[in-house]
Image: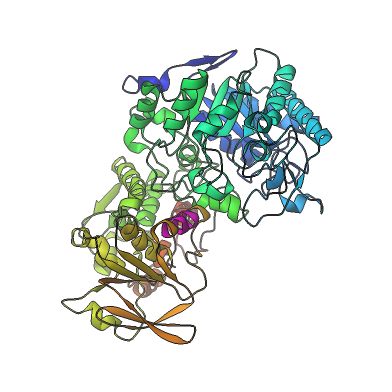
Amino acid sequence: MEKYAAIFEPLTIKRMTLKNRVMMPPMGTNFANMDGSFNNDHIKYYEQRAKGGTGLITLENACIDFPMGTNGTTQLRIDNDQYLPGLWRFNEVMHAYGACTSVQINHAGASAYGLRLEGNQPVSSSTIPSKTGNTVPRSLDKEEIMEIVKKYGDAAGRAQRAGFDCVEIHAGHSYLVSQFLSPLYNKRTDEFGGSPANRARFAKLIVDEVRRVVGPMYPISMRVSADEFLEGGNNLEDTLELMTYFADEVDILNVSAALNDSIQYQIDQMNLADGWRSYMAKAVKEKFGKVTITSGNIRSPQIANDILTRGDADLLAMGRGLIAEPNWVNKVATGQENLLRKCISCNIGCADHRIAKSRPLRCTVNPDVIHEDDYKLNQVKNKLSMVVIGGGTTALEAATTAAEVGVQVTLFEEKSYLGGLAHEIARLPDKKRIDDYVIYLEERAKQLPNLTVHLNTRADLRTIEMLAPDIIVNATGAKPLLPPIAGLQKQLENPNRKVFSIFDLLNNMDQFQEFEGKRIAVIGGGAVGLDVVEYYAERGAAEVSIIEMQEKLGKDLDMITRISMMDMMKRHGVHELTETALTEVCEDHFKVKRDGEEVEIPFDLGFVCLGMRAESPMMEALTEYGKVTDTAIVNLGDSKVARRIYEGSREARDIVTTIHQVDRTKPLSQLKMFSNAY
């Protein structure tokens, strides 16, 4: 704690005293019941973060006006007293761990969830959709505005009665208050539109009403989009002016950024620097002298401590970081920084699951965001051994999980390093954060005396027979898909070649450092192809082209990565050719067919990135071995089907189901394959 003293300094805000400077910001989960109430898994999820030492837990945004103000596939409600028992129970659990609590009260406005509106048109400041392509809202009249103001006050009063230590008003991220503040949405000509004072009037009325209801000593927080990062929207200077009209009665200013159409700067894309938004919080703090919160890819204790000691902000909002690592505070406090499971900003299980796919929140690097380490409580009753073939993230997660429940594990990796494809992709500068997961898994493995790792060792049946394991896990990963396209194999074997696969780039980065004046052509518009495009376009290549057979680039990417990739290509003028098929690979150009016509795409460097295919050369022999010896054989991750880290880590954690089936069944004759825990 002495090393990072600023993080652990208490902070008193009126009647609320926080034990440290780490807070969990409000993040939707899709965990709530359909009626807007809590369930046990929902509370358990928050409990893990409170138990992990977090100073302030802010409950995800709760609806103050149902159904017109609701958002998300499922959302908590705070619009009438029947929800108080669940909210009170939430606070009892959080407070038992010494965490303070807040709840974000919100009206979605034009961002309302359409299927709940029963055919009604969503409401807003004006008739501008809150996101490109969304439903056109109608303008609220003055009487409706005043009714909503009162509902904010009513909701704040319920928050106080429910035992929350603080209440937060959401005034950013394209929700209703933001729709009044932003000139992109607000086209009104009455006293609620036009000048900054008029656009801030709705926010001021809400703050004043909330203060009237909760009294002078109850902390009020307000979350704002300090810079909207859209042409014609509010920038930092604009927001500072707007806040002069409503900040007086606010105690905590939660400084965020962006709107729906710039969401990659709200839910940060992977290549943004740790703590990159702190300059905005600093500007707010200097102007208003209030307690200020900053956020934005804060994972490193050193960076967190630096932000505080510089005075940029008073509190650190760790959103996805606490989804990935609920025990962040406790691990830093006890000198276990090496065991932090840092968020890699992949945005798959959190943002993409929740916003784009209407699924419950999950996490790539944390396979169980609800129950966390509960699996360790169920140790094996018999002496069991397991062999893991492969050293990628799936293999490591399976090996460490098994060892943690008492299995004797031996892992074989034929390469000289662990991490597999994840470690290799992380060699790209814009993807380096992925290596944080590999490092965590390696550090976790080092803590386990019953886990033995053999590098530079290719597993074979003879070795496996000598070990006679009870379980064999095959996690040998994937290799590039290289279909029989005319000229492809010939050019890949050309000693003076200009055509490469993704692994040629990743395994020889030093040879691909020339960017200026280079013409780059990439075949394949999936994740791998876009990574190559990003690598060259962001570093000044003269001309970059991407060719994709389907109608859409990055169709399987998470929403944040896809939006950021589309923005990157637009900024750098990348030539996009969709619905275009590769017909032949030549020495210095690709032949493609588009709209029925043959076209040549010249290049100085050409990359063929047509995805990955499962690579499991031993599975047939292992399956036969398993039948003969009654050994459980499990194929996991990319060696089963080429996918993402997310699916591999989920499957790997579920190895505990297989382990306990084997533990109870000796000899094993038929093993029912495991299923997801939830």
Chain part drawn in magenta: 561-569
Q: Main secondary structure of the magenta part?
A: helix
Looking at the picture, does residue 668 appear above or below residue 625? above
Whether residue 564 appears in magenta in the rendering, the answer is yes
Q: Which of 165 and 402 is in front in this view?
A: 165
> Residue 166 at what x, y percent from top left?
62, 22
Q: Is 582 placed above or below 101 here?
A: below
Q: In the image, residue 50 lies at what x, y percent?
A: 53, 29
* Residue sitting at the far left: 495
**Nearest to the observer: residue 424 or residue 661:** 424
Left or right position of 119 against 194 = right
Q: In which quarter of the image is residue 273?
A: top left
Residue 528 x/y as whole percent: 38, 64
Left or right of residue 318: residue 195 = right
211, above or below 478, in the image: above
Q: Residue at x 36, y 50 (%)?
A: 434
